[in-house]
Image (cartoon, rainbow, N blue to C red):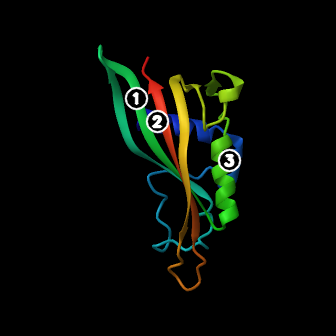
């Protein structure tokens, strides 16, 4: 797992508000396959949930050679059965404070969006939320209502020790 993913997972799993909203359902790249595909919104225990994926990662170099700074882009998707529930989960992600494993540089940079500090000993220069969009996935089954999603993009800057 990449450094940026490790930071996001540790941060979000450590936050009581996020884990309460999604019952700890935080998945790498995709949610587990449901009984039906595409999943029925009515599958028990399937929603709400979060899916995280790394979009890209670049080592940052300078004129003096290779650096120890890495810039990664992560996408976090909040899935729910209603737009309000998806929005609430997305807002919980943005405001997440992590747990004991998260040490902010100061109180004003403690939330996930804008965080600076360390997570599980990893130096985080900044987590910057730079885009969010609402998506509605149309119902596929006659007895389904569709699935609401908020997709959020974050740039995670880390530095190796």
Q: Earlier in the sequence, mark 2 or mark 1?
A: 2
**Could you say where residue 119 lies in the image, as x and y percent from the top left?**
56, 28
Q: Is residue 57 left or right of residue 41?
A: left
Where is residue 22 shown, x and y percent of the image? 64, 54
- Looking at the rendered structure, the secondary structure element under dot 3 is helix
Query: Given this view, does label 2 or label 1 mark the residue nearer the observer?
Result: 1
Q: Residue at x 61, y 77 (%)?
A: 145
Q: Residues within 10 Å of mark 1 (few under 14, many from 20)?
A: some
Which residue bears the numbered disc 2?
A: 4
Q: Is the Cβ of the residue at disc 2 closer than 8 Å to that at disc 1?
A: yes
Q: Helix or strand or loop: what does disc 1 sit on? A: strand
**Distance between the Cα atoms at labels 2 and 1?**
9 Å
Q: Earlier in the sequence, mark 1 or mark 3?
A: 1
At x 71%, y 45%, the residue is 17
Query: In the image, residue 99 lies at what x, y percent?
Result: 66, 32
The residue carrying mark 1 is 70
Quarter of the view holding residue 61: top left
Q: Is residue 21 above or below residue 118?
A: below
Residue 23 can be seen, yes or no: no
- Where does the C terminus fall, quadrant-wise? top left
CA gap between label 1 and label 3 equals: 26 Å
Q: Looking at the picture, tell me which residue is in the foreground, 130 or 138.
A: 130
Q: Residue at x 67, y 35 (%)?
A: 97
Q: Is residue 17 visible?
A: yes
Q: Residues within 10 Å of mark 3 (few under 14, many from 20)?
A: many
Residue indicated by mark 3? 92
In primary-sequence order, the first of circles 3 and 2 is 2
1 and 3 marks in contact (CB < 8 Å): no
Q: Position of residue 26 (x, y in %)?
A: 55, 50
Vertical arrangement, residue 6 with respect to residue 79, above or below: above
Asked whether 154 or 36 is in front, the reply is 154
């Amino acid at each position: 797992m990449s450094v940026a993913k490790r930071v996001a997972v540790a941060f979000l799993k450590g936050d009581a508000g996020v884990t309460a909203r999604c019952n700890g359902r935080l998945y790498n790249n995709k949610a587990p396959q449901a009984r039906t595909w595409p999943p029925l919104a009515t599958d028990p225990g399937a929603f709400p949930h979060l899916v995280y994926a790394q979009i890209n990662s670049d080592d940052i170099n300078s004129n003096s050679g290779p650096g120890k700074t890495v810039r990664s882009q992560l996408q976090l998707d909040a899935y729910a059965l209603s737009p309000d529930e998806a929005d609430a989960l997305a807002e919980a992600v943005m405001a997440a404070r992590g747990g004991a494993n998260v040490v902010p540089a100061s109180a004003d940079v403690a939330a996930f969006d804008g965080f600076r500090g360390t997570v599980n000993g990893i130096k985080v220069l900044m987590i910057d939320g730079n885009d969010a969009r609402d998506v509605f996935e149309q119902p596929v089954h006659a007895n389904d209502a569709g699935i609401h999603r908020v997709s959020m993009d974050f740039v995670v800057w880390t530095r190796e020790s």
